[in-house]
Amino acid sequence: MLVLLACHWTGALSNGEYDMARITVEDCLATVGNDNRFALIHLAVERIRQHREGEPFLVEGKNKEIVMTLREIAAGKVTFDNIFDLPKERKKKEEARLAEAAEQENCEAESA
């Protein structure tokens, strides 16, 4: 197995041992389908920028942002094809949700 790109301790388990969050370069490269580690790093950096601007994680977990980002990539939820569309999609969904809530309030106000 190649070098771990990111790992950290997630905390003590009940038996006193530690659980290590691990994600390997191979996990991410296998999903991305590109043996270019440099490109993988650029993908991860762009996604971390998005998280720092408020984008939610697409996978469940309680790890640091780099580990969570790599998990998103390994799970196939973040790719070179969709990296710039993810924030737009979230904003569209949020706007639709807000519009639906406003419409529902209007209907309730009219019926009262």
Image: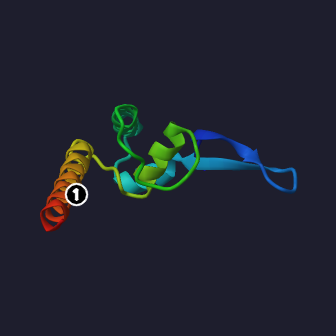
Q: How is the image coloured?
A: rainbow
Comparing 38 with 65, the one in front is 65
Relative to 91, say whether 38 is above or below: above
x and y percent of residue 88 in the render?
20, 45
Extreme-front residue of the structure: 112
Relative to 72, say whether 66 is above or below: above
Question: In the drawing, does residue 103 fall left or right of residue 66?
Answer: left
Question: In the drawing, does residue 22 fall left or right of residue 50?
Answer: right
x and y percent of residue 111 in the render?
15, 68
x and y percent of residue 92 in the render?
18, 50
Residue lying at 87% horizontally and 56% vertically, measured from the top left:
15
Residue lying at 18% horizontally and 59% vertically, measured from the top left:
100
Mark count: 1
Q: Quadrant of the C terminus?
A: bottom left
Comparing 35 with 10, the one in front is 10
Query: Which kind of residue does numbered mark 1 sit on?
Result: Ala
Give the labeled residue for mark 1: 101
Question: In the drawing, does residue 47 fall left or right of residue 93?
Answer: right
Disc 1, SS? helix
Comparing 15 with 106, the one in front is 106
Question: In the drawing, does residue 16 fall left or right of residue 22?
Answer: right
